[in-house]
Image (cartoon, rainbow, N blue to C red):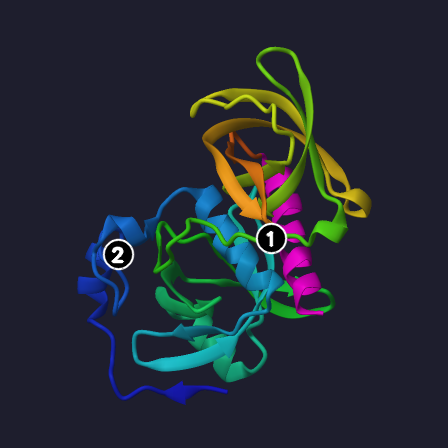
Amino acid sequence: MLLKDPVSLEPANAKRQTASTQAPDGFPPDARHRLTLPMQISAVLLDLAWLKCVVRLRSRDGYRIATTLLKVDPVGCTFIFDGCRTEAERDLLLTSDEIAVSAMLRDVKIRFVIKRPYPIRYQGGMACAAAFPAQLYHFERRRHPRARPDAAMGYRCELRTPDDEVLKLDIADLSLSGVGLRTRLANTDPFPAGTILQKCRLDFRNQGELEFDLQVVGHGLVWSDQRAMHHIGCTFVSLGPGQQTFIQRLVYHIELAGRE
């Protein structure tokens, strides 16, 4: 359904000249809220697709469409969304040089602008595809949403310390940024921030396992059930597109399990 917004966007020429540097309407031009790396933008779009968030498109003349993302391709830096369902939608989408996109992701405002989409056949029907935006704005304290698996899931990490000692730790939290590890072992030596832990094996039971290089960003004590535990915060040194998708699915799986 197309809705007419009485407030029009800026003239086409003015917007086109500043699209690469100005934030979408309602967002301050603050670099703290701007994502520009394809991997960062992909993480947000994958979240929108997995959680089936309502995504709103708005053309320059104020027409709006509500849709959802169907697929995100982190390698090709494109995404598919439900569009071209009617002739009016098709005419609007395929004749707009730029489209403003907005959504809510876990109470976080998401805004970005895409160039003219193109029609594509998806799962037997017509849909629309578009390239990743050059930049994406969001208001979020964490760079990526963090999920905390229940202890009963039994997610574990096996790593080798710089002293060649093998440790097995519980996975306390997980995001596309990194992982939080915990252990009750009292003799665990502190890991200095910046320590690189190579070939750490993260075991997610029936969800699978992967091997990553981790970098320690913090090591401290936390209390759980009146007992002190070592908490080691780590970031992923690098994530390939396949690993990124795997982690994102795990975050989504953990969130769903927590709602049951």
Q: Residue at x 28, y 64 (%)?
A: 24
**Tag 1: residue type?**
Arg
| Residue farthest front in this picture | 226
**Can you see residue 176?**
no
Query: Position of 37 compared to 76: left or right?
Result: left
The percent coordinates of residue 52 (x first, y second) are 59, 69
Residue 254 in the magenta stretch? The answer is yes
Residue labelled with disc 1: 148
Q: Is residue 121 above or below residue 222?
A: below
- Sequence order check, earlier mark of 2 and 1: 2
Neighbor class of circle 1 (other Cα within 10 Å; few <14, some 14-19, many 20+) is some
Residue labelled with disc 2: 19
Query: Position of 203 compared to 143: left or right?
Result: right
**Can you see residue 60?**
yes
Secondary structure state at the residue bearing disc 2: loop
The percent coordinates of residue 168 (x first, y second) are 70, 29
Q: Is residue 248 above or below residue 180?
A: below
Which residues make up the magenta segment?
A: 240-260
Of labels 2 and 1, the one closer to you? 1
Query: Which is the main secondary structure of the residues drawn in magenta?
Result: helix
The percent coordinates of residue 155 (x first, y second) are 72, 43
| Residue farthest left in this picture | 14
